[in-house]
C-alpha cells in the first residue's frame, strides 16, 4: 500500500480507493478537513512527490491551484508513495462523531432570513464537541445539511444552530415553513477541524460573514472560561453583512474581553461605522500580523479573499484557519 508522508515527518499507509483524510484518521492522524466533499478547500495541501487520483470533482480548487500541484485530501487517494506539504493536528484528539436522535426544543427568528434552532439531545446522550465544529442534521428522506454549533456549553444537552434561509432549499423550507417544537430529527457529529489552537502571546482575530458568526460565538464563549495561560493577547471580532439587520445579535453580550467591529458592505448613509469587507477592515487597522492568528468563517469568497490579502500582507500561512460555508451543504 502507498505510504503518505507529511511535512512534520509523520506518515501512514493509504488503502486503494480511500481518501487521504479517512486513511489518516484510520490510524489516529488528523488532517485539516471540513466538508469532506471537495468543496470547501479546508483540506487543501500540495503534493511534493508521488501521484494521487481524484475520487470526485475538486470544486474547491481553481485551475491555477491544480496546475501548481494543490489537491483536496478529502477527495484524493494515493496511487504511489506520496509526500504532502501539510501537517497533521498533532496531539489534538477530536471528539468522536456519532449519529443521535434529537428534538427541536425551540425556534426563534433572529432576522428576516435567520432562525435560531435549539436542538435537544436525549438525557443519556454523550455528546462532546470542540467550539467551532459543526454537525450534520438529517431530515425527512435522509436530506442532510451542515450547521455550525453556536454554543460552547452543552451541559444541558441542547445545541444551538443559526440557520439562514436559502431560496428553494429543501431543508431551508423545512426550517422556515414547517418546523415546530418537539419535531424528531437525527444529527451526526461533531465534524470538522475548525477550532482554536495555541493562542498564547498572539492577537486573536475572527472574521465572519452572515451566519459564519455562529462558530465564532461558540469560540468566544469558550474564551470566557479559558485558563490564563491559554488566553491570547487580544481578541477582535470583525462581523460583516450587507445591512445592519444581517448582524442579528450583539457579540458584545459575551464577556470574552473582545473588541467588536461591525462592517457593512451596503451601509446606508446614516451608518457611521466601518464600510466594506471584513478582511479590508482588519488590514486598515495595521495589525501586527507576525503575531496574529486569524479564524475566518462564512462565505467562500470572503475566505479566499481574506487569505490571499492577509498572507500577502505578512500573516504566516500556518496562522490562518477557516471554515467556508459552501452551497448545498452550508452550515
Image: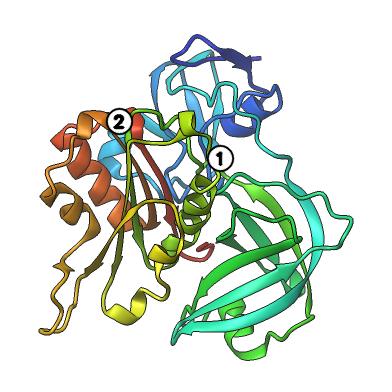
Residue beneath label 1, please?
55
Q: Earlier in the sequence, mark 2 or mark 1?
A: 1
Residue 119 sits in quarter? bottom right
Farthest residue toward the bottom? 177
Query: Of residues 23 and 121, which is closer to you in this image?
Result: 121
Q: Position of residue 42 (x, y in %)?
A: 44, 42
Residue beneath label 2, please?
317
Label 2 CA crowd tier, 10 Å (few <14, some 14–19, many 20+): some
Q: Is residue 97 visible?
A: yes
Name the side, left or right, on which 239 lies relative to 312. right
Q: Position of residue 154 (x, y in %)?
A: 69, 56
* Residue under the point 60% across and 53% down: 152
The CA span between labels 2 and 1 is: 27 Å
Farthest residue toward the top? 9
Question: Which tag is nearer the camera, tag 2 or tag 1?
Answer: 2
Label 1 CA crowd tier, 10 Å (few <14, some 14–19, many 20+): some
* Residue under the point 17% across and 78% down: 267
Is residue 322 shown above or below 298? Answer: above
Amino acid at each position: 500500500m502507498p505510504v503518505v508522508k507529511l511535512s512534520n515527518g509523520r506518515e501512514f499507509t493509504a488503502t486503494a480507493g480511500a481518501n487521504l483524510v479517512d486513511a489518516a484518521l484510520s490510524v489516529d492522524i488528523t488532517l485539516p478537513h471540513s466538508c469532506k466533499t471537495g468543496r470547501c478547500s479546508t483540506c487543501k495541501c500540495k503534493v511534493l512527490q508521488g501521484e494521487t487520483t481524484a475520487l470526485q470533482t475538486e470544486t474547491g480548487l481553481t485551475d491555477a491551484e491544480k496546475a501548481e500541484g494543490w489537491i483536496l485530501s478529502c477527495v484524493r487517494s494515493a496511487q504511489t508513495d506520496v509526500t504532502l506539504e501539510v501537517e497533521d493536528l498533532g496531539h489534538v484528539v477530536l471528539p468522536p462523531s456519532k449519529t443521535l436522535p434529537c428534538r427541536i426544543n425551540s425556534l426563534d427568528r433572529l432576522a428576516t432570513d435567520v432562525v435560531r434552532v435549539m436542538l435537544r439531545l436525549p438525557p443519556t446522550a454523550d455528546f462532546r464537541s470542540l467550539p467551532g465544529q459543526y454537525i450534520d442534521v438529517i431530515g425527512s428522506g435522509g436530506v442532510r445539511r451542515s450547521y455550525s454549533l453556536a454554543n460552547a456549553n452543552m451541559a444541558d444537552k441542547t445545541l444551538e444552530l443559526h440557520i439562514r434561509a436559502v431560496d428553494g432549499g429543501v431543508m431551508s423550507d423545512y426550517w422556515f415553513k414547517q418546523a415546530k417544537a418537539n419535531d424528531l430529527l437525527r444529527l451526526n457529529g461533531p465534524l470538522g477541524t475548525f477550532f482554536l489552537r495555541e493562542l498564547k502571546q498572539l492577537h486573536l482575530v475572527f472574521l465572519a460573514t452572515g451566519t459564519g458568526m455562529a462558530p465564532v460565538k461558540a469560540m468566544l464563549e469558550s474564551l470566557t472560561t479559558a485558563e490564563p495561560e491559554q488566553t491570547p493577547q487580544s481578541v477582535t471580532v470583525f462581523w460583516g453583512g450587507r445591512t445592519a439587520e444581517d448582524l442579528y445579535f450583539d457579540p458584545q453580550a459575551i464577556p470574552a474581553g473582545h473588541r467588536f467591529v461591525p462592517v457593512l458592505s451596503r451601509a446606508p448613509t446614516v451608518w457611521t461605522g466601518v464600510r466594506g469587507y471584513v478582511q479590508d477592515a482588519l488590514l486598515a487597522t495595521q495589525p501586527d500580523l507576525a503575531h496574529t492568528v486569524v479564524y475566518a468563517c462564512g462565505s467562500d469568497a470572503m475566505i479566499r479573499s481574506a487569505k490571499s490579502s492577509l498572507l500577502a500582507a505578512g500573516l504566516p500561512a500556518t496562522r490562518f484557519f477557516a471554515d467556508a460555508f459552501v452551497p448545498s451543504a452550508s452550515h
